[in-house]
Amino acid sequence: MSDNDCQKDSRQPKKQRFSKPAAASSTEDMTDSKRAIIEAFTFYRDQLDAHYDQRERVIKISRDVTALSKKIVFSLLRITQEPAAKVFADVEHKHSAVLDLFAKMSVELQGSDGYKYNRQATPGLQEYIEALGLWIFLRDNTLISKEQVEEMIGSKGAKILVTDDDYVLGISDLPGEVNRYCINSIGKGDHEAVRNSLMFLRSLKEGINMIMASGRIRDLNKKLEVLDSSLQKTEQAYYSMSIRGSEMQNVSAAASEPMVIV
């Protein structure tokens, strides 16, 4: 065998060290894996974007409900200065606008989303319940029920979850507004309105104390402090008004007695 033949035989095995089909298969597998990862993260990104967009829509509507509910409260407090019929007509108009907002919010809170986004919806719900509570108190001299709240919210077809916490925290904001109504009524000399305010706040405190004894609701302790302060102010106003009224009656009675000259 020649030297050239020996060199050819020795080089022959080196040509089998690389396999092109195997390299192509590995590249294809890596491409498929990368594509699957990208598709998965794209799906998660879209899910998160949809979640945050929906969350922001609920927050925005809740803020709008809060703003309109505050306007309802301001309108109701004018009842000591304007005819009740005029005040209630204005409140009805604003209330209709709030119900339209709840109809929009209802679209975002279907099914389990009602629980998922309740924390974003509850500020507006609580402010709305406070406004409704003041309205019913001034109109009927009673406390609005959770069933009445749900009925009013659904009067335009909205289906929104109102939890027990939403209701209790909403009516717990009432004392401050009832106290303002009471102070305004003193300026008019409306003794009956002041007395009704005091009786209402006492009943409300009794009910909330029962709730506090049976369980714990987040942030209720803070609102209980405001309730105690409002009740104390209302009691002082009522007692002062009663004392002044008695003094004026005594003065009037003394003035009406004939003067005896000795």
Image: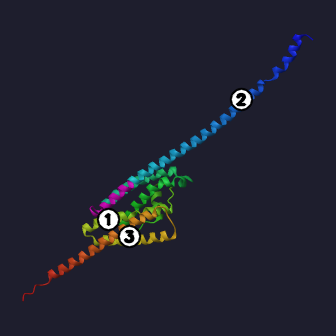
Binning the other alpha carbons within 10 Å of mark 3 as few (below 14), some (14 to 19) or many (20 upward) gives many
Label whose residue precedes the other's in the sequence (2 or 3): 2
Q: Which circle's residue, 1 or 3, is located before the other in the chain?
A: 1
Q: Nearer the viewer, mark 2 or mark 3?
A: 2
The residue lying furthest to the right in this view is: 1
Query: Horizontal and vertical percent for residue 47?
Result: 57, 43
| Circle 3 residue | 201
- For the point 52% across and 45% down, the residue is 52
Hey, what amino acid is under mark 3?
Leu
Residue 192 appears in the picture as rendered: no
Measured from the top left, where is residue 8 in percent x and y? 86, 14
- Give the secondary structure at mark 1: helix
- Real-space Cα distance between discs 1 and 2? 78 Å
- Identify the residue position indicated by label 2 in the image: 27
Residue at left 51%, top 70%? 214
Dot 1 corresponds to which residue?
181
- Tell me the amino acid under the disc marked 2: Thr
Q: Which residues are magenta?
A: 68-85
Please tell me which residue is depicted at 77% across the width and 27% down the height of the picture.
22
Please indicate whether residue 57 sits to the left or right of residue 10 in the image: left
Which residue is more in the foreground, 42 or 113?
A: 42
Residue 254, image quadrant = bottom left
